[in-house]
Image (cartoon, coloured by chain):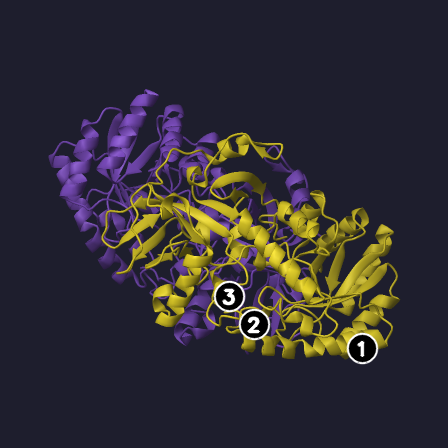
Chain colours: A purple, B yellow
Amino acid sequence: MSQSQKPAAHDASRRRFLKSSLQTTGAAALGLSTNVHGYTAKEVQDFYVDGEMQRNVSKWELDTPALCVDLDVLDTNIDTMQSTTSRNGIASRPHAKTHKCPVIAQRQLDTGSVGICTAKVGEAEVMFDHGIDQILMTTTNVTPTKIKRAMELSRANPQFIQATDSMTNARLLSDAAQSYGITADVVVDVDPGGHRTGITPGEPALGLAQLIDSLPGLNLRGLLCYDGGSQHVQGFTARRDQTLGRLEAATATYDLFQSSGLSTEIFSGGGTGTYNIDHNTRGLTDVQVGSYVFMDAQYIDIGGETDDEVYSDFGPSLTILTTVLNDQYEGRCTTDAGAKACTINRPWPRVKGEHGMSYTSGSDEFGSLRYEADASRTYRVGEKLELIVSHCDPVVNLYNHMYAIRGETVEAVWPIAARGMST
Amino acid sequence: MSQSQKPAAHDASRRRFLKSSLQTTGAAALGLSTNVHGYTAKEVQDFYVDGEMQRNVSKWELDTPALCVDLDVLDTNIDTMQSTTSRNGIASRPHAKTHKCPVIAQRQLDTGSVGICTAKVGEAEVMFDHGIDQILMTTTNVTPTKIKRAMELSRANPQFIQATDSMTNARLLSDAAQSYGITADVVVDVDPGGHRTGITPGEPALGLAQLIDSLPGLNLRGLLCYDGGSQHVQGFTARRDQTLGRLEAATATYDLFQSSGLSTEIFSGGGTGTYNIDHNTRGLTDVQVGSYVFMDAQYIDIGGETDDEVYSDFGPSLTILTTVLNDQYEGRCTTDAGAKACTINRPWPRVKGEHGMSYTSGSDEFGSLRYEADASRTYRVGEKLELIVSHCDPVVNLYNHMYAIRGETVEAVWPIAARGMST
């Protein structure tokens, strides 16, 4: 649903949030021209030596489209997650599939996360190459190639844990681990009811866990149950009721594991939409939160515990900087950030710090900004604007690096080292 | 619209096309297990030395998700485009934003294209770095950084041509060209009515062309008018009528240029949807066709001149190979190719060579395959299947390389060198 199709009350609430909590400043907000001299991506990368920018570069000087992360908002998001989960007696094991960025993974571990998750073995390999050890891969490796890669990673990094969801797969993992002469850590992936991945909770999951426990070369660490289908349920109460209901079978499985003497050291689940609910799922040890570091328009719209319209627990730290290419037609302008820079996820990206305008990125190469009657401003050719991303995960996967911004200044250039690691 | 929502007649027609013209063979079609031993992406790349594969690798041995291009289909598509445009007395100037792959650009030039187009200066830089000279950049460079990059490219490659769509921009380009001591080639971008980019046809475009002609440092080469809004109009007749109507103003502008003694050496437009229509636009010199090399589900659905249901002028050469990760729930299975491997463009990807099943890639990491009552087969964990992509341009932009396949065998590994070059 585009912003213009939303009910007025919802609009007003979100607008207030976007205006107040984002604390937008910058050339655009001040009404100054942003058509400033700038730097190419290569120049900015070259300025970044030994972790320090050798030149003062404003974010408005970046060539566009550019993916930016606001460091103050990022750090606040990480702090909020850490303090809330600590208070609730649960750990965080953030999903690196969201950021694909070892610097952010390290930041999460340094502030108290018990590990990171990855969706793909390729992401896990990259994270390990960048010094991250505590990795839980939440997907099952099913082909000989993937199993080989997972076992090589396990051999190099004994802290690597992988998921499995079938007896056939557990036997393949056992055979492979033995041939590598290692013991590979595994968790049972339990289906929360979406039937996407995972084994059926209850007896089937127990049977798989018992098999793992009996197989040579494998070390059972527990279970995971990621309730992806509940993360974006609109409204806190509805979301809470749905996810607690759906995870009851996982807790029953946890009980079966315990009464059978099997490891429940790890019982991982939850996400950004349910991070302050998941501790009510008995037995759950950690939340696999991903999007909270960046937030996005999809999550803003689900509503929070205190505001049913706007999910404001975390601030949108991730933005796309884009430049206006054409302003010569009434009521609109065209930018350089289309589907290849923003994806076509809905809701569409939102212009940070502004109101009365809607942005679409349906064209591959161009974004389209339309002004409504109460538009807070208009843009001229060459000026830059900042977009709150629609859906952070696939947006990050389009860029080779992100610019880490403190205030208005580029503080670092972070490689998105696991970008494109879908294998 | 998903396949299951389509009218039955349309379904039958497309199914016939997919079954007959794709000539699918391979392990999947033969009912053999595709759970074969395989190679990692790095291993396959290492096998590819000096343009030759040092080992026989079947596409079914590729780690997934993998982007594949069928060389026979690709070559047939290029031949069809070249012979049709030649017969119609018009040239082709294929858009490299589609493939972002210098090897394919060179193949297009070698078979008669007069040049390539790029949407971004970053793509143009990469193509030039890989030996491609004849480049028309169809977007206007508006910031100092972009203009600097364009002028540096013009200096290194006098055959580089860029678009402009405003007098202010033309003056900036003139100033920059003079400061670089070069003459930069430009074309006027004329708006076909979509108001996305380009200047209004008629007097405004003429005025801009006259200014360019008078400015030092610039060399007017003609005009372009890309009618993107007509490319996917359903039905050949409707598409023809719309695009010929919309390009009338561009032809009138072409006449104004001619009567004013301005260059009309280039009058570029058209695309894959109108390639066999565009020669009826008087004055048009070349078609900026992009998707024809790969085709995709979006283009298959627009209908062709001989079959109003299915656009079969070109074959789908581009596929995504994916592996089944979970088969334990009735009527469905889950694969490893979700939104990060397929995008979320509609129509959803289609399983090559099969019928009675629908695929969705709405999850970031997982694809979901559902069987209908008449499904041609089912899949087991570890088996691979091939997907016809939904929309080729943004899919290509997700991958670092594509595997060039002859029959069933990997013949080459082609870098998608301009991937992510959205700046």
Q: Nearer the viewer, residue A314 or B233?
A: B233
Disc 3 target residue: B311
Q: Name which of mark 1 and mark 3 comes first in the sequence.
A: 1
Q: Label 1 marks which chain's residue?
A: B
Left or right: residue B184 compared with residue B372 = right
Q: Secondary structure at mark 1?
A: helix
Q: Amino acid at mark 1?
A: Leu
Is residue A307 depicted above or below A398 in this figure? below
Comparing labels 1 and 3, the label whose residue is closer to the camera: 3
Query: How many dots with numbers?
Result: 3
Can residue A276 be seen in the rendering of this structure?
A: no
Q: Secondary structure at mark 3?
A: loop
Where is residue B269? Give x, y as percent.
Answer: 68, 67
Quarter location, residue A174: top left
Mark pair 3, 2: CA separation:
33 Å
Quarter location, residue A161: top left
Where is residue B218? Give x, y as percent.
Answer: 84, 60
Mark pair 1, 3: CA separation:
36 Å
Q: For label 2, count other residues whose C-alpha is less than 10 Å away and answer few (under 14), some (14-19) or many (20+).
A: some
Q: Nearer the viewer, residue B80 or B172?
A: B80
Q: For label 1, count other residues whose C-alpha is less than 10 Å away and answer few (under 14), some (14-19) or many (20+).
A: some
Say yes or no: labels 3 and 2 on the same chain. Answer: no
Left or right: residue A107 compared with residue B230 = left
